[in-house]
Image: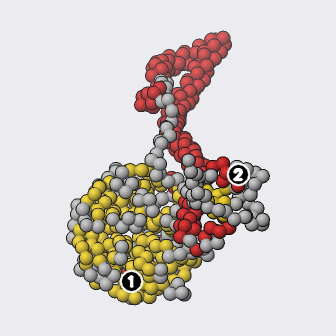
């Protein structure tokens, strides 16, 4: 039987010193093309004796630096390194979330205990006031009767003493007069004594606990439970308040739109003070204020969105215009373009290379070009107030319309870019949905302006959690922006501030 021919191998370079993993006393010399492995002389003899292509490493390595294989390997390694670093960052966030959510849960328990204590303090004070009123009334009455009884005892003793003295001295005239007077007062005293018995009755009482509280205590086995949430649920940690009220403001600021331009610069629409503000968040100062000429509703901005690195689009609903503003190096804003709308435009976001804008009269959502040309109009199932709209920027396929009603809790409606309604979210705990924002995983964060909270819902409009509420200092949250790069929520409030929360 003929053995397969094996390519003749040249002698190895003596300077080659990489040690074989299998044979620690040998250096790596050969590369087997069939198995795509490197090995030493012992490997070659033991495992690659019959392989047709076994070359010296020094020969195949000479042109390897420009090979497609190396380029593909480098690309793959870089992707894996990025994935690995992302995973490390995710582990770090989850590690922090472990502690933060524990602190939040414990603080809620403590707050519940405080609320219960405060509530019982109020009830206890009310009961104690009732008891004190009875004490005061009964003691006052008894004190009055006691004084009257004391006076009668004094009169009776005096009459007995006089009768005894006059009788002993034989002063019959005085004895007779005194006795007759005493006899007349006996009837009065007897009547008074009969009345004293009734008048001296006090209120008899005891405290009886409210039956519902007694029943609750009898049935109470725990004060609450740990609600295991969706794996997409984020853990928020308060980071800071950004003060957006400055000396030039006449009224309390109501922030209806927030956009993040950079790590240090945010732009906010202050509806009540009729201005668009550029705020330096590092040094916490007002970099510039942009106001239109005039006053009143016509110059009130509502919402805004970043369209380019240094450009934003701002809606002026009662002016029926959208302004494109350019942010200069000096942090000042100037009007680059005005777009006329035929009706009141409120919420605004980007979708692909267009704008998506919500309108009230009639209720609708429109996709516009950056020149103001209407591409599509969606009337959907909106009510009177579809004031905010947000886009899933990762997919660019879905839009979320915050559709609040009065009265009623309102809804969040998910529609496609073709205008089809995909899902509707409604919850009695989310009252008056306003600003919304979508993270890179598709979770939607919606402000409950009238319920003073923020909900996190899924891309299919299923509830994930109530992520923030009054206990986190929220009061009338109007708008919200998610910073995907740093996993932060910026929430525009109606009390001169923008609250920032880090999510883990």
State whether residue 319 is above or below residue 240: below
Secondary structure found at label 1: strand
- Tag of residue 15: none
Question: Could you tell me which residue is drawn at 60 percent across and 16 percent down?
Answer: 160
Front-most of 54 and 367? 54
Q: Is residue 126 visible?
A: no
Name which quarter of the figure residue 163 lies in.
top right
- Tag of residue 324: 1
Describe residue 204's horizontal placement relative to residue 381 as left or right: right
Front-most of 478 and 44? 44
State whether residue 200 is above or below residue 400: above
Residue at mark 2:
42
Question: Dots 1 and 2: beta carbons under 8 Å?
Answer: no
The image shows residue 66 at horizontal and vertical percentages of: 58, 74
Describe residue 425's horizontal placement relative to residue 278 as left or right: left
Name which quarter of the figure residue 90 lies in.
bottom right
Count the marks.
2
Front-most of 120 and 300? 300
Q: Closer to the N terminus: mark 1 or mark 2? A: 2
The image shows residue 50 at horizontal and vertical percentages of: 59, 52
State the scheme by which the image is colored.
secondary structure
**How many other residues sit within 10 Å of disc 1, few (<14), some (14-19) or many (≥20)?**
many
Q: Is residue 66 visible?
A: yes
Question: Could you tell me which residue is drawn at 61 percent across and 19 percent down?
Answer: 157
Describe residue 338's horizontal placement relative to residue 147 as left or right: left
Q: Residue furthest front?
A: 1
């Amino acid at each position: 039987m003929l053995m397969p021919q094996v390519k003749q191998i040249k002698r190895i370079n003596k300077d080659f010193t990489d040690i074989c993993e299998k044979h620690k006393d040998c250096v790596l010399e050969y590369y087997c093309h069939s198995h795509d492995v490197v090995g030493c002389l012992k490997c070659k003899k033991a495992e690659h004796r019959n392989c047709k292509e076994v070359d010296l490493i020094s020969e195949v390595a000479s042109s390897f630096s420009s090979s497609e294989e190396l380029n593909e390997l480098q690309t793959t390694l870089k992707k894996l390194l990025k994935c690995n670093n992302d995973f490390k960052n995710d582990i770090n966030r989850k590690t922090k979330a472990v502690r933060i959510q524990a602190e939040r849960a414990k603080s809620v328990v403590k707050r519940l205990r405080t609320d219960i204590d405060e509530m019982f303090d109020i009830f206890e004070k009310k009961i104690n006031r009732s008891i004190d009123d009875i004490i005061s009334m009964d003691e006052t009455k008894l004190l009055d009767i006691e004084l009257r009884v004391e006076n009668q005892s004094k009169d009776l003793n005096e009459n007995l003493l006089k009768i005894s003295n006059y009788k002993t001295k034989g002063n019959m005239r005085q004895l007779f007069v005194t006795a007759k007077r005493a006899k007349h007062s006996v009837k009065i005293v007897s009547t008074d004594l009969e009345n004293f018995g009734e008048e001296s009755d006090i209120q008899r009482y005891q405290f009886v606990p409210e039956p519902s509280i007694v029943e609750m205590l009898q049935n109470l086995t725990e004060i609450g439970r740990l609600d295991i949430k969706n794996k997409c649920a984020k853990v928020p940690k308060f980071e800071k308040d950004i003060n957006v009220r400055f000396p030039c403001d006449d009224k309390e600021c109501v922030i209806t739109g927030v956009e993040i331009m950079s790590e240090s610069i945010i732009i906010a629409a202050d509806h009540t003070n009729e201005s668009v503000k550029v705020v330096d968040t590092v040094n916490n100062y007002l970099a510039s204020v942009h106001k239109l000429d005039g006053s009143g509703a016509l110059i009130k901005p509502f919402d805004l969105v970043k369209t380019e690195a240094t450009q934003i689009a701002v809606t002026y609903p009662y002016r029926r215009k959208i302004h494109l503003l350019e942010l200069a190096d000096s942090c000042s804003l100037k009007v680059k373009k005005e777009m006329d709308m035929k009706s009141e435009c409120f919420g605004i976001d980007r979708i692909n290379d267009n704008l998506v804008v919500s309108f009230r009269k009639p209720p609708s959502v429109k996709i516009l070009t950056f020149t103001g040309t209407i591409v599509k109009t969606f009337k959907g199932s909106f009510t009177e107030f579809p004031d905010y709209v947000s886009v899933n920027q990762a997919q660019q396929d879905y839009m979320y319309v915050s559709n609040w009603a009065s009265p009623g809790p309102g809804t969040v409606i998910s529609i496609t870019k073709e205008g089809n309604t995909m899902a509707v979210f409604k919850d009695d705990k989310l009252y008056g949905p306003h600003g919304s924002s979508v993270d890179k995983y598709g979770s939607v964060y919606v402000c409950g302006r009238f319920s003073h909270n923020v909900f996190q819902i899924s891309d299919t409009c299923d509830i994930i959690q109530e992520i923030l509420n009054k206990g986190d200092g929220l009061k009338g949250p109007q708008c919200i922006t998610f910073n995907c790069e740093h996993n932060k929520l910026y929430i525009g409030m109606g009390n001169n501030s923008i609250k920032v929360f880090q999510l883990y």
